[in-house]
Image (cartoon, rainbow, N blue to C red):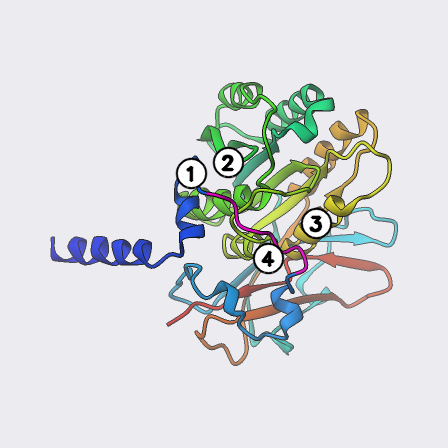
Amino acid sequence: MRKSAVVWTALALLSAGLPPSLQALQNPASSSPPAQNSLDQKSPDEKSGEQGTDNKDIPRIKVGTNEVNVVFTVTDKHGKRVVDLKQADFRFVDDNKPATEIRSFHAETNLPLQVGLLIDASNSVRDRFKFEQESAIEFLNQTVRRRYDQAMVVGFDATPEVTQDFTDDTEKLGHGVRGLRPGGGTALYDALYYACRDKLLKQPQAGPTRRAIILLSDGDDNLSHVTREEAIEMAQRAEAIVYTISTNVSGTKGSGDKVLERIADATGGRAFFPFQIRDVANAFAEIQDELRSQYAVSYKPADFRSDGHFRTIEIVASDRKSFRVRARRGYYAPAQ
């Protein structure tokens, strides 16, 4: 009983210490006024490892080991996925130093998935919303395996709303997608932050699991309490690969599309720009194939310190000319 009381007291203190803008995300339906966004905030890796003061109050995810796990994708120079490479075909660099020990290396095709489907339900995506819903449902039907994978559905306009929590029941997931109705402003960063911190990070894992988020949006955010980089940081803490599918129908890439590219690139995902309706289904199919065609490595980094700082990750193929590796840019070391 004494241990339980200590844990609850610590949680209460942590919650009380959050700034008001982040406390609002503990209740997605909060009606507090939105803060000004900063789309030009520098990324953690652009700060050369320096800890940014803007993120000092974001909860640190503490782990009891210095083992780093990374899921990554390899393609050839034509963009085709390569799935038969070996550990010896790569170099693993952590914070500019080679990893001291590779503890495991294997293909990820059969590891369980935890998938978050985030769908922009604001007025700005109304034009082809119905088709996108049906494409999302087909993706879930083809991807989620009963008693093995889990997925959730989150719609967002001014606030994120979970229309179906984690389940392996694709029928329930389909109802969650069909229950979304477009309307309101757009708080994309809040939705991504919430899905990672309050859902993925709190979802139990029975063993090694891959986490992915599929984000459908035009990338234009006008109501979030957190910034783009804070949302990306939380995705990195959740070890979630974010795939973005643009709903921009203008035929040319806009500022929102650049946001989607930044989010995908920082987390090891991929950004899709289906300017024609039929291409939306193709984007989902590409993501489904990629989720079954990845590698995973677990390694021990050199000179590791539990200082809470951002550490970069670089996975380099021995044959740089023939292969391209796509992985998350880094991670946050646990804080003491």
**Residue identified by numbered label 1:** 30
10 Å crowding of disc 2: few (<14), some (14-19), many (20+) = many
Image mark for residue 159: 2
- Give the mark toward the camera: 1 or 4: 1
Q: Disc 3 to disc 2, how far (Cα)?
A: 19 Å
Q: Measured along the vertical axis of the image, is residue 102 above or below residue 143?
A: below
Left or right relative to 23: residue 320: right
The magenta stretch is 33-40
Image mark for residue 259: 3
- CB-based contact (under 8 Å), mark 2 and mark 1: yes
Instruction: Find residue 125 and report its image quarter.
Output: top right
Sequence order check, earlier mark of 4 and 3:
4
**Residue identified by numbered label 4:** 229
Q: Disc 2 to disc 4, how far (Cα)?
A: 18 Å
Locate residue 170, reporting x and y percent: 53, 23
Left or right relative to 191: residue 138: right
Question: Is 333 covered by the magenta stretch?
Answer: no
- CB-based contact (under 8 Å), mark 3 and mark 2: no
Which residue is depicted at the point 27% across and 58% down?
A: 13
